[in-house]
Amino acid sequence: MKIALMDSGIGLLAAAAATRRLRPDADLLLSSDPDGMPWGPRTPAGITERARAVARAAAAHRPAALIVACNTASVHALESLRAELEPDIPVIGTVPAIKPAAAAGGRVAIWATPATTGSPYQRGLIREFAAGATVTEVPCPGLADAVEYADEAAVARAVAAAAALTPSDVTDIVLGCTHYELVEGSIRAAVAARTGGVEPIYHGSAEAVAVQALRRIGLAPQPELPATGTLTVLHSGRPAALSATALGYAEGRLIAEPARDAVVGG
């Protein structure tokens, strides 16, 4: 059973690691687009074009499901990808976890890219799911790129800037970009300094997306299974290996471990 994940870069690692934890026997295929990244500054049509190329490269390997592990691609290209690939390949998008974050009616901060912050898409989610909460949209310029290139100094600067825009009495924080989940520890530390050590609840999308993908193909989470899953990596459609940058994150090492004897990139 093969599950594919796609993104412009390494933001897909969080959802891939969640999938691996839930189903250690799953074969994972990671399809990213180093030739075309970043996708954020592109037009919606340009994002859709790149996303379709990455999805087609993954689809050629006949996965049981495709996770669009990218908020930007989910906003602009999800309908197009579903129209092309479903029903043969279920396509699962990534939506910021605003609904669970706002369920208790607290004070919610949504960390997202500048392109997503204030967008009609995000504002629509806020209207639909967060009417009873106090919501602060926090743009995080440069954070996704800093995570992509594992630039620790740039990550620290971007996280500090976003933390400064986060209300000190925040109760819930939505990590509205898949890249941000890879540096959640740094975010937690910066926000704790802002809130006087009172830690809010953090809401990512990786595990929920992984669970939804399994549900769509009729599988239940079974984390107790042996770790037999293999790993295939595509860079802009070309067979590749998991990059050193990806392996620098715990999520990258987790998904690589079961594939130690597999043909990576095959």
Image (tube, rainbow, N blue to C red):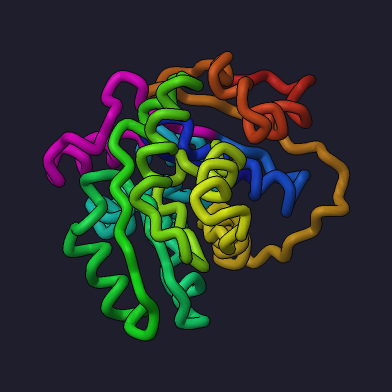
Residue at image coords 82%, 39%: 227
Compared to residue 202, the image places residue 67 above or below, namely above
Position of 250 compared to 260: left or right? left
Position of 83 compared to 217: left or right? left
Position of 101 compared to 117: left or right? right
Toward the viewer: 135 or 219?
135
Toward the viewer: 29 or 109?
109
Magenta-highlighted residues: 30-54
Residue 244 location, quadrant: top right
Toward the viewer: 137 or 56?
137
Residue 31 location, quadrant: top left
Residue at image coords 73%, 48%: 21
Toward the viewer: 9 or 248?
248
Was residue 107 drawn as part of the magenta stretch in this picture? no
Looking at the rendering, in which quadrant would you find the C terminus? Answer: top right
Compared to residue 58, the image places residue 203 above or below, namely below
Residue at image coords 40%, 29%: 157
* Residue 138 point in image, percent of width and height: 32, 53
* Residue 81 point in image, percent of width and height: 30, 52
Residue 266 is at least partly visible in this image? no
Compared to residue 198, the image places residue 39 above or below, namely above
Residue 99 is at least partly visible in this image? yes
* Residue 232 point in image, percent of width and height: 59, 28
Residue at image coords 62%, 21%: 248
Compared to residue 161, the image places residue 112 above or below, namely below
